[in-house]
Structure formats: structure tokens, C-alpha cells
Image (spheres, rainbow, N blue to C red):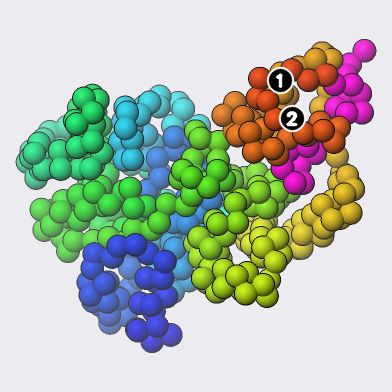
Amino acid sequence: MDLHETLRFLCQNTVDILSKEELKTRLLSAEKEKRPLRIKAGFDPTAPDIHLGHAVLLRKLRQFQDLGHQVVLIIGDYTAMIGDPSGRGQVRQALTREEALKNAKTYQAQAFKILDSGSDKLELVFNSGWFFDKDMFRTFLEKVGTCYTVARLLERDDFEKRMKANEPITIREFIYPLLQGYDSVKVRSDVEIGGTDQKFNLLVGRNLQRAYGMEPQVVMTMPLLVGLDGVQKMSKSLGNYVGVAESPKDVFGKIMSIPDGLMEMYFDLLTPWEGRKISKEIQEKKVHPKEAKKRLASFIVSWLFGERKGEEEAEEFDRVFSAKALPKALSELELDETTIWIVELLKRAGMSSTGGEARRLIEQGAVALDGKKVTDPKAHVGVKTGSVLKAGKVRFVRLKVRK
């Protein structure tokens, strides 16, 4: 792959690159000096699960790894206790130290499903390593605190909107971009990748590196993956996510439930295929939308769990959906009651992790009990031993009432 092809490959599906010419220069220098570029991305462990929205960034990081570069993955165990204001109209709930560390443990294993975890390809660091340093406060005030003015930080879109809406901005949130930017100074990143909502923070890192006499990092932003509802960005708190640690069956089923209009974005950001071409084939009736979605779901399951798993789930989907049969292996839920709130039933069955996610499934007409759709999120339903609860196209649970 020559330099032109490399640039095209790395820049594919990005939104902003500041700047492409600088990235070209960095790649040339790295080749000349026979060293890998240091590609930074940071994740605050605000929840125990990584979802496909995170996977968009991880996939781009993996592309750099496959070309011989080193990923510096920062687990923001310290910054998670501060709370990133990016894309927030209100104050984000900060985590305790214990919560951040507990979530961080699961982040590593899930990220390694996508990244090459070889020692020469990945450097994993926790930013508490420098922020807990006893001299950090003085260093921060003397150097970092003089690089930005209050007026400049208020230019941030999130803060500007809050000011106009008379919503509070805490000092803790106010300094968050400086903390994330300082991470770039500590790890001496050549490139930092983040979502479009992170652009301000990424540019702060670039400016802080310059203030410390370093070559400023190249900034690359990626689109925010829209969640299963087809409206808002994928988020665990919104219940519209696909977790990379979910079962292959659940991942497959959730992908099959996305609105057809999302397929182009998912193909672009999560597969090697061009979404535009898939959309064209669907429009020209060369491919049925369901078949295109099966191809997408099968690829994502294979990517996360191994090729055979993708094939197995596609075969099981055909058997269950097309033949209207029950899955071969049906999980079972035992209950003490014979009448239960449908939202609570979905949560106990593991078909939703939050009430919001359960309500969304019900309102979309994706929930059925013994073959009858349940469309009212307030409904209390009668259950008996042998009842079958269905959520989506391929998720089933058999119910058993204890005597």
C-alpha cells in the first residue's frame, strides 16, 4: 500500500482531520525513522459495557495497528470521576473511584475483542497514574491553567447552549477538556481519534502539546453511531445500544431490529463494505433489505465472536424467523407470581437492562407473550408455566411459575 492508498484507507469514513497534510507528514516521518506512530484514544469507564458506538473508534484504531502503528488506549479512571460534558445539556453524574475501577476491568476485555493486544501494538494506561500525583495540582495551575482563558472555554458549543438555557456549568466540568488534553501531553500522541462530540477536547490536547513544545497531534473525528431507535446516538443510558459483550444471539437479533435507514451507516462504520453500494442494491431491488441486514448482523457477530458464530446465528435466524419455529436452545426464567408488569418481566428475563429500553421495545411492537403482541408499557400480564416471552425477532425466554 503506497502513501496515497494508506491516507485514503485511514481517512475513510472520518468527519474531520486536522490536518490531512500533517497526517501525511507524520506517516512519512514514521517510515523514515522506522518507528510506529502513537495513536491515542481515551474512554471514560462510565458504564461496564462497551457498545458498537465505541467499536467505531476501536475499528479505526485497529486499522492503524494493522499498518504497524501503536495504539495508546487511555482508560479514564480519573476523568470518569469528573464527568465529560461533551454532548450534554445537563450536568453529568460523576462516578466514585470504586465504580470507575469496576467498570474499567470489563472495558479492557471488551476492547481486546477488536484491538490487537500485542505488547508492540498496544499500550494501555490509566490516567489516574498522573492525575493522582501529589504535584499535579501545582503543575496544572502553573502550566495547563494558563493555556486557556475562561472566554475561550465558553466557546465550546455545549457550554454556550447551557449558558443560553440558564443551565449550570460546574467548575469540575469546566476543566474537563484541559484534563483530557493533558493526557495527550503525557502519552506524547501523534494522532488522537474521537467522536465528533469530542472535537473541542481533542483540539485542546493539540494546543496543550504545542504549549509543552511538542509537535501537535493530528485530530481525527468519527461519526457518532445512531442507536437502535434510529434517532439518538447509541448510548447505554438511552437503552438503544448493542453491547460487544452481549451474547451472539442478542447481538444478531438487535442488529436485525435496526430501522432499514440505518443500514448504510452501520455498513460504512462497522464493516469493510460501502453502505452507499448496499443502499443502491436495495433500491434497485437486487437485494432484499432483510438479506442485507442479515449480512450485516452476521458480519458483526463474526467480527466479535468468530466466523462460525456469525454463520450459526444466521442459520438459527432463518430457522426461527422464516419457519416460525422456536430456537433450539431456550433459556428459562422462574417466577413466583402469575401476574407481572411487562417492563419488569423484560428486565428479569435479561431482554432489557433498563426500563427505558424495555419501553422502547414494547412501543416498537417488538414484544409478544405466547404469540400475542404487548403494546402497552403499563400493562400487567398473566403468565403460566410454559409461556414464551419474545423480544425482537430472535430473542425468546420460556417462563416457569414456581408452585
Instruction: Name the residue that disc number 1 marks.
Output: 379
Q: Is residue 105 visible?
A: no
Q: Quadrant of the C terminus?
A: top right
On the rendered structure, is 364 left or right of 372? left
The amino acid at mark 1 is Ala
Residue plotted at (22% across, 46% down): 182
Asked if residue 267 is among those painted magenta in the image, a careful observer would answer no
What is the residue that sits farthest to the bottom in this orientation? 2
The amino acid at mark 2 is Val
**Which comes before the other along the chain, label 1 or label 2?**
2
Instruction: Name the residue that disc number 2 marks.
Output: 374
Is there a contact, CB below 8 Å, between mark 1 and mark 2? yes
Query: Magenta segment range?
Result: 383-403
Work out how far the residue at label 1 is from the one at label 2, CA to CA, in angstroms: 8 Å
Picture coordinates of residue 336, whole percent (x, y): 83, 14
Residue plotted at (76% across, 42% down): 395
Which of the two residues, 110 or 131, is positioned nearer the viewer here?
110
**What is the count of numbered marks?**
2
Q: Is residue 359 visible?
A: yes
SS class, disc 2? loop
